Amino acid sequence: MTPWQEFVAAHAEGGVLDGVVTRVVPFGAFVEVADGIHGLLVTDAAPQAGTRLPVRIEQIDVERRRFSLVKA
């Protein structure tokens, strides 16, 4: 089982995780929530890279291997 598959098996939509912002983009920020596992935090006011924050899994797209986050 890959790390992505393990993450999806262990976490569900609505779950709250602690993550670190790794990259800020115009539409939000990428947040690492597990070793090598990143989700997209969609927000108007993205925190700076390196910021640790709680996030909630809003949606998991298994086919595209992506998930979206919101601030918890």
Image: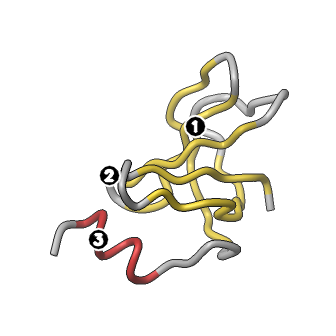
Q: Secondary structure at mark 1?
A: loop
Q: Position of residue 25 (x, y in %)?
A: 61, 20
Residue type (three-letter) at the residue carrying disc 3: Gln
> Which mark identifies residue 50?
1
> Which mark identifies residue 36?
2
Say which residue appears at 75% left-offset and 52% top-offset: 70
**Gap between marks 2 and 1, in whole Å?**
15 Å
Mark toward the viewer: 3 or 1: 3
Say which residue appears at 60% left-offset and 24% top-offset: 24
Q: In this rendering, would 9 be left or right of 22?
A: left
Where is the N terminus found, in terms of image quarters? bottom left
Say which residue appears at 40% left-offset and 61% top-offset: 62
Q: Position of residue 16 (x, y in %)?
A: 68, 72
Residue 51 vertical position relative to residue 66 in the rendered view, above or below: above
Mark toward the viewer: 2 or 1: 2
Q: Are marks 3 and 2 in contact (CB under 8 Å)?
A: no
Q: Secondary structure at mark 3?
A: helix
Residue position for label 3: 5
